[in-house]
Amino acid sequence: MGTFVEKMFIESGIEELTSMTDVITQSGRTPGTSMFLQKIVKIDQETKVLLNLAETDKIIVVELIRTADQEPVMYSLDKLPFSLFPSEYHFSEELLLKDLKNDANIEIDYAVFRLESVNFHSEISPKLNCDENTCLLVLEQVHYYKGNRSILYSNNYFRSDKIKFHLIRRRKR
């Protein structure tokens, strides 16, 4: 005889900008980071357009894996202008938006996002310990501050078997 334990999902609303650290904590689980990389690179065409930057600008790329109870639940790839920070600056592993506010005086007002489901991703799925049958939810978003100025381009990949999102929709009056 054994005991069947149902795996607990993390569930969150998606209408408010909330850090994954807070979402994981509010679900009763312990947030963590199993991978954190930060590098300065030449700008790519897509980021140049989305963040309204020049061809010669460099960007900071922050790549991380967020965990809940030491289990990978999200892979994040964030891109932002290098010119906003000192050359030796390092983001904390937990709260990128808080670092922006405290260290660059940039407070995000809103983000425009697109949510889609993708099948196995050859590069990202293994980082999240996903098998070929686990879909990923991809949240692609551009963050804005100070009168519609784009500042941060993010791609977040969530394990669909670990996290669920909900959105409250209201009838237009």
Image: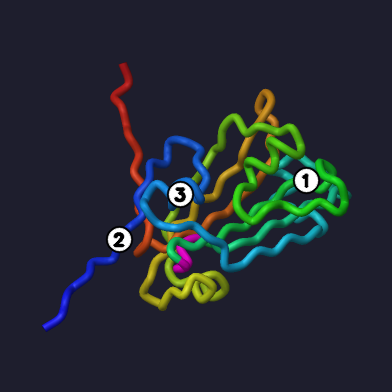
Residue bearing mark 2: 8
| Lower sequence index among marks 1 and 2 | 2
Q: Is residue 77 magenta?
A: no
- Decide which of 35, 81 is in the foreground and name it: 35
**Is residue 14 positioned above or below 170 on the image?**
below
Residue 115's mark? Answer: 3
The local secondary structure at tag 1 comes to strand
- Going by the numbered disc 1, the residue's amino acid type is Pro
Residue 107: x percent and y percent? Answer: 66, 32
**Is residue 119 positioned above or below 145 on the image?**
below
Residue 54: x percent and y percent? Answer: 84, 43
The local secondary structure at tag 2 comes to loop
**Label 2 CA crowd tier, 10 Å (few <14, some 14–19, many 20+):** few
- Going by the numbered disc 2, the residue's amino acid type is Met
Residue bearing mark 1: 81
The local secondary structure at tag 3 comes to strand
Closer to the eye: label 3 or 1: 1
User: Count of labels shown?
Assistant: 3
Closer to the eye: label 3 or 2: 2
Look at the image and give the residue range highlighted in magenta. 70-74
C-alpha separation, residue under disc 3 versus residue under disc 1: 24 Å
C-alpha separation, residue under disc 3 versus residue under disc 2: 22 Å
Residue 44: x percent and y percent? Answer: 75, 55
Residue plotted at (16% across, 75% down): 3
Residue 66's mark? Answer: none
| Lower sequence index among marks 3 and 1 | 1
